[in-house]
Amino acid sequence: MSLSVSPVYLGREKPDSGEQAERLSTSGVPDAPETGTNRDHLITEAFSVFYGANEAVRKVSMTIRAGHVTAIIGPSGCGKSTFLRAINRMNDLIPSCYTKGRMVFDECDIYSPQIDVVYLRKRIGMVFQKPNPFPKTIFDNVAYGPRLHGIKNRGQLVELVEKCLRQAILWDEVKDRLDENALGLSGGQQQRLCLARALAVNPEILLMDEPTSALDPRATTHIEDLIATLKGDYTILIVTHNMQQAARVSDHTAFFYEGDLIEMGDTKDLFTNPVEQKTEEYITGRFG
């Protein structure tokens, strides 16, 4: 998708080449608070995603609260991963994919032709189902994004890499191995490294697409503990097939079925007293 010469940077000015992106107001769009969980961070209004003629996500309207964890559940093929990838426009890479409706992030329409998609993906990071570290050193994996966004000072990078690896509860395991290839890490360590890499560009929203499906129970516990630690500082959306995991880690849960958002609410309420019959049938194991 082509961008205009003077793109809107989602309510912020684009950072100078020697700095990380700063949260500055521009184009008359209000600057979002640095912290706080009393605001709507992401809103969709009759939002649909199409693959050619197939409407994979159908007219979804929902609100994501800042600093909260929202789980997206539903059977395979229900549109939950497609919806998640739409939030940072990863679906743009699929030629037949297009959207209708609105998706608003900090009062800016994500799908406006003026949006700088690279900067959008800085503010909305993503961790995928399978760990995908770069074939580089552990240090260079975490430093990759900051370098891309203009940080060249070695001292700054060293400090930032350590900070993010500590956030990912990985520092103590790799602090003496930073120059080793990241592909030598275990699967669980690789996934935490990918999370550290996402955190290194200082995002506001973290998208997690089945982040533990390829991990053993111990590594899964590490990731779930991480989510609990990061909650409040980041807005987190996690797609999961594991309803027990959704119940453990999330504040709110959205249930998708055949492209439709069937029900969304507080996690405890949705699992103990669902409003929709289809939701009850799914969480009680009658299908899925």
Image (spheres, rainbow, N blue to C red):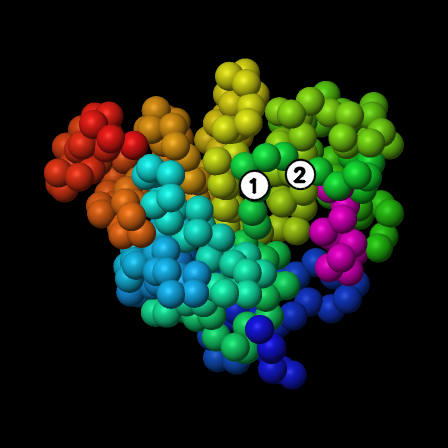
Q: Which residue is mark 1?
A: 128
Quarter of the C terminus within the rendering? top left
User: What separation in Å lies between label 1 and label 2 (alpha carbons)?
Assistant: 8 Å
Q: Which residues are magenta?
A: 141-151
Q: Is residue 235 depicted above or below 110 in this figure?
A: above
Are the two marked residues, 1 and 2, in contact with CB atoms closer than 8 angstroms?
yes
Q: Residue at x 70, y 58 (%)?
A: 20
Q: Secondary structure at mark 1?
A: loop
Q: Is residue 103 depicted above or below 151 in this figure?
A: below
Residue furthest bottom as drawn: 5
Q: Residue at x 54, y 78 (%)?
A: 114
- Counting from the top left corner in percent of width and height, residue 205 is at 50, 50
Q: Can residue 23 be seen in the rendering of this structure?
A: no
Q: Which mark is residue 132?
A: 2
Looking at numbered disc 2 in the image, what kind of residue is underneath it?
A: Asn
Q: Nearer the viewer, residue 3 or 286?
A: 286
Q: Residue at x 43, y 70 (%)?
A: 109
Numbered circles on residues, count: 2
The crowd level at tag 2 (other Cα within 10 Å; few <14, some 14-19, many 20+) is: some
Q: Can residue 288 be seen in the rendering of this structure?
A: yes
- Counting from the top left corner in percent of width and height, residue 190 is at 67, 30
Quarter of the N terminus within the rendering? bottom right
Q: Is residue 118 left or right of residue 49?
A: right
Looking at numbered disc 1 in the image, what kind of residue is underneath it?
A: Phe
Q: Is residue 277 left or right of residue 220?
A: left
Q: Secondary structure at mark 2?
A: loop
Q: Residue at x 38, y 44 (%)?
A: 77
Q: Nearer the viewer, residue 45 or 15?
A: 45
